[in-house]
Image (spheres, rainbow, N blue to C red):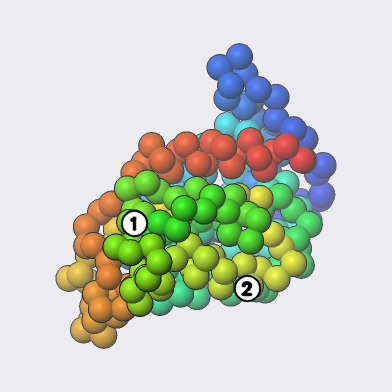
Amino acid sequence: MDQQQGQSQEARPAPETPGGGVVATGGRALLVYATKHGSSREIADAVATELRTAFGDVDVREAGAAPPPAGYDAVVVGGPMIMGWHRDAEKYVKQHRDQLAGVPFALFVTAAALTEDGMTDVHGVPVAKDPWLVKKPRRADKLTRKERYALPSHYLGDIFKACGPARPRTAAVFAGSLDLTTMNIFEKLFVLLIVGVTPGDGRHWDFVREWADEAAKTLSAG
Ligand SMILES: Cc1cc2nc3c(=O)[nH]c(=O)nc-3n(C[C@H](O)[C@H](O)[C@H](O)COP(=O)(O)O)c2cc1C
């Protein structure tokens, strides 16, 4: 984004259509994504499509080359769990956390394992969990190491720490896509032994669109 054009525009609540959808207000949104194998980029594109119902302009940028949040009316940052949140997504929120604290902000995580903990939020942030991804622990009173590793509070707790003073208004954990043939032996051992993932494309586009539609409303509400 051209910083000269990045004049702060007051975010306005997006008017609702009779059908409950929102009408684009003309504001500008930034969608920053990180990816290792591409599945999170496709999710980012689907999220951006929904954001366009509320914002006139949505810039989609890879985290390594994304502009700062200043001048945008809303920012969404997303990326996969790759032994922790993708380092480019984490770096972006760390680097820009003071600006992110001043703009309506949401984030999403792509993952291949998630333990159901019965909670709807992490540190007060509402978290939408892909119902096809979450798995109930075998014993709720005694989680295994893999189950503890894949808790929403583990994934998102670390991410929120990186965000510092910036708190997302909403967060989502989406099922991603995992192809063992693209991974080296260490990566395979990590995802199979530490995380306990299920290989394959688990993305559920209706769920992605539903969350993105809600996020568009939440972010455009000023
Ligand atoms: C090296 C590696 C590490 C991963 N670590 C985790 C993890 O800690 N937790 C998890 O749920 N999924 C993990 N995954 C699964 C990815 O989050 C999932 O495959 C995601 O869709 C990848 O996104 P991408 O295609 O945008 O790179 C890992 C995948 C790889 C390749």
Q: Residue furthest bottom?
A: 186
**188 or 197, which is in the foreground?**
197
Residue located at (75% from left, 60% from top):
101
**191 or 205, which is in the foreground?**
191
Q: Amino acid type of disc 2?
A: Ala
Residue located at (49% from left, 68% from top):
155
On screen, residue 125 versus residue 194, left or right, reads right
Q: In the rendered image, is residue 39 in sight?
A: no
Q: How far apart in space, not on screen, are marks 1 and 2 (Cα)?
A: 28 Å
State which tag comes first along the sequence, 1 or 2: 1
On screen, residue 27 versus residue 41, left or right, reads right
Q: Position of residue 108 (x, y in %)?
A: 51, 55
Q: Is residue 81 above or below residue 176?
A: below
How busy is the neighbourhood of tag 1: few (under 14 within 10 Å), some, or many (20 plus)?
A: some
Circle 1 sits on which residue? 136
**128 or 49, which is in the foreground?**
128
User: Which disc, if any, is residue 64?
Assistant: none
Q: Residue furthest top?
A: 18
User: Which disc, if any, is residue 162?
Assistant: 2
Q: Amino acid type of disc 1?
A: Lys
Quadrant location of the N terminus in the rendered image? bottom right
Residue located at (74% from left, 53% from top):
103
Q: Is residue 156 above or below residue 21?
A: below
Secondary structure category for the residue under label 2: helix
Q: Position of residue 147 (x, y in %)?
A: 36, 69
How busy is the neighbourhood of tag 2: few (under 14 within 10 Å), some, or many (20 plus)?
A: some
Q: Position of residue 181 (x, y in %)?
A: 17, 71
On screen, residue 213 versus residue 37, left or right, reads right
The residue carrying mark 1 has its beta carbon less than 8 Å from ligand 1: no
User: Based on the displayed image, in which of its 4 quarters is residue 15 positioned?
Assistant: top right
Q: Position of residue 191 (x, y in %)?
A: 28, 74
